[in-house]
Image (tube, rainbow, N blue to C red):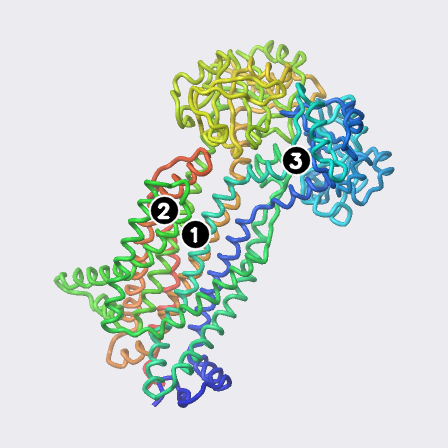
Amino acid sequence: MSITGLEPLAPGRPRVGSVVMLYLVRLRRRWAGELMAALAVAAGVALVYTASVASTLPSESVRALSDGLVGDSQLQLIARGGTRMPEDFYARIVALPGVRRVAPVLQVPGNVIGRRGEQGLMFFGADPRSVRLNGSLLDGFTGNEMVRQEALVLTSPVARAIGVRFGDDARVQLSGRTLTLPAIVAGREQIGALVDTAIVMVPLRYLQRLARTGREVSRMLVEAQPGRLAEAQAGLRRLVAGTNVEIVPADHESRMYATATRPAERMTRAFGVLAALAGGLFAACALLVAAGDRRALVRHQRMQGVRPAARVATLVVDALAVGVVGTALGLALGEALSRAGSGAISEAGVLMDAFPVTDRRVVTWESVALAVGSGLGAAAIGVLVALLRGGDRRRRRVVVMSWLGVACLASAIVVLVAAPGGAVVAGLVLLALALVLVVPVGLAGAVGAFEAANRGLGRPSNAVELAVQYLKIRRWRAGALAVALTAAVTVFAATALRGTEQGLEAGLDRTTALTAPAGIWVAPPGSGSMLGTTPFSPGSTAAAIAAQPGVARVSAYRSALLDVARRRAWVVGVGVGDTDSAVLADEVVSGDAGDVTARIRGGGWATLSAGLARALGVGVGDTFVLPAPRPVRLRVAATTTNLGWPSGSVVIGADDFRRAWTSDAVTGYRTVLAAGVSDADGRRQVTSAVERGTPLRVETAQARADRQRSAAHAGLTRVRQIALLTLLAGLLATGATVAALLRQHRSHVAGLKSHGPTTGLMWRTLLIETGVLLGAGAALGALFGVLGQVLATKGLAEATDFPVVITARPGVAVAVAAVVVGVALAVAVVAGYAVARARPAWRH
């Protein structure tokens, strides 16, 4: 007699047609369960795919810009700290032995305003000499066209974002001027991969006139003659000795960008690995629901004498059917979610102040292969579990798994204490494995405690007693475990990821308090505005602002980006008259926070972010040379977090800053309002004092802090996407697994109702059964998730130097658990009612 409605395969070699026919006949009776399993697999595959895509940073746009500029050149001469060099260097470089070609380039930060908005961009000035280097920056334009063209060349994504069409006039804020200029829009067919960068292309001579730089440039690209690179380098060293110019490799920008994105890469990798692991577990658990039915089929085939190969072939077809359908759906769903959450220009965050990049979605073949492999692999594991024997062997496996789970948990705690920065991914994986191994024991304990509590009542509940018996039925044991595991993994992963994200956000928000004491800020808009690194001539602006009746004090703000120890560091100059702290005490990693501000204002001292100090090989009290346009020797007053800038930060005194940059230029003004003056009144007064036509943004400290916070949070966009998608995929997988398990109860419920139980009793029974499974899984997931928060935040703080608030967030765990249990119970209410209404066979 067959338990499936079709005789199993006859003894002998398995035939593909017979195996497929067996599956199709079985599918007629269990199509709904297979569909639920496929949906759960799809949720896991979609999560793996989107997490992998989100973890891939768009370094190609920077590489394209670098290649488009440098072409065949091997070396660059760059002016340090955002300064410039005389274009006269061109003739002197060309005359050096070993030099083949030279091309000057000018970079000027600015702002472009269209009908729909504005965008801070980097203006690049080049000419036919760049074309001769075979760079792609001017592809699509002949050298003569670029020389004669007096227009802006905007990339098509930028033009669409701000509302500029080909031939339109755009307003440009550049070097203290507001201009109206014609615009040309270039797409991928003209400039290739450069379309993904946040740049404006302008002929060199035209940009020099617009920016009023005279015959100065930002860099010189040098191509050496074949076999004479060393000779050319030696000549260049002699030429730049004692100047503000340094020699760097041609791919210098790509290297700086790689260093700047390394912290984000570590964060997204940690989040991506945990999300991918969760996705694989979702898919595997989906197939566990029907493990009891498959095990019964295998046992029946074994009794009939079907060979092992045929039994395995039966399960392989099951795995392929569900795995292929689920994987295909998951890839489609993942692609849709990934496109919906793909980045835009603004999502590059503060990195745009140093690198003219956009946050472009990058899909690699590795991401697709990982998603496909996880779906098919998890389906195979979930189906082939049916080959495992039960009985005493199962009990021994549970004991072994429990001890392995304890060992994994202990190892994760050791990682947290001993090496959180270097092993955050390993620690999270160990925690996830510990959770998976502990859930079976935790579920058994929860069922036993629930049964004992019910029987301890004066009048035990029939629904509870029946639900407990359902939880003990061997046929559905794997399915029950699958529901608990899916809920546990969902709560654990979402809690750990969301809690860590909140810790990162809180740390970044804390750094915006550096601007809080100032009532009104005045600074140029556009590229460089987030960090305040765009210099301008002070003129009479400060005096005009100070003369306003509502202004108590005005202090100059100075900051710049400077390449230090192969990193693009953020250097901030602190004024002597400032009353606020140079560095917040919470940002100090080592050193006396109380003495830092006084030492920096006194001159000769600086703070370094911890990673930058490690790269320079210095500590508190040591001296180092800051490689500014005019190098200065300073002592380390303290080490700090990176103050939100991933490449590292340096805080020095205002006098040291002026000496190092040999300039009185400022990058902003911080205005403290008189007592009783509101921010709105203060802003109106300061705006009236700023010279008409001068493109300076006047904003309250709160508005600036909100803008910086938004930009900082934009850098966490990928992390936030992974955390949200993990929760959504987990909800889909949990709901599908619950529905599949309850549907398996249909025939048993129908038979039981023939002996008297009502639809209401059976409905309550199914809801109680589901509630116990979800509650046990969610409780364990929340407990492990809180531990995962602490491990991840502490590890990322040490690995990235980002300001992170390290604390357990049980509220996040409770909220996530409530959402998961609530959504899954809502599914159970509907699916359970449909099953509870099943009629006994004799009533048909």
Between the C-alphas of marks 1 and 3, the distance is 37 Å
Q: Which residue is mark 2?
A: 788
Q: Residues within 10 Å of mark 3 (few under 14, many from 20)?
A: some
Residue 752 seen in the figure: yes
Residue that appears at 40% across and 43% down: 792
What distance separates the C-alpha of mark 3 from that of mark 2? 41 Å
Residue 513 vs residue 114: left or right? left
Q: Callout 2, which amino acid?
A: Gly
Secondary structure found at label 2: helix
> Which residue is at the front of the view, 702 or 423?
423
Q: Which residue is mark 1?
A: 274
In the rendered structure, which amino acid carries the disc numbered 1? Leu
Residue nearer the viewer, 205 or 660:
660
Tag 3, which secondary structure? strand
Q: Nearer the viewer, residue 674 or 46?
A: 46
| Residue 297 vertical position relative to residue 649 in the rendered view, above or below | below
Residue 624 screen position, x and y as percent? 51, 21
Q: Residue flagged by tag 3: what amino acid is it? A: Pro
Quadrant, the C terminus: bottom left
Q: Pick whichever of labels 1 and 3 is earlier in the sequence.
A: 3
Kindly check if marks 2 and 1 are in contact, taking CB atoms under 8 A apart as contact: yes
Q: Position of residue 139 (x, y in %)?
A: 79, 44
Q: Which residue is mark 3?
A: 249
Report, in whole angstroms, how far the alpha carbon at label 2 lies from the one at label 1.
Answer: 10 Å
Above-or-below relation of 403 to 72: below
At which x and y percent is residue 170? 76, 34
Residue 498 or 834: which is nearer the viewer? 498
Task: Give above or below for 104 relative to 757.
Answer: above
Q: Residue at x 50, y 63 (%)?
A: 373
- Counting other residues with Cα less than 10 Å from the Cα at mark 1, is it few (<14), some (14-19), or many (20 or more)? many
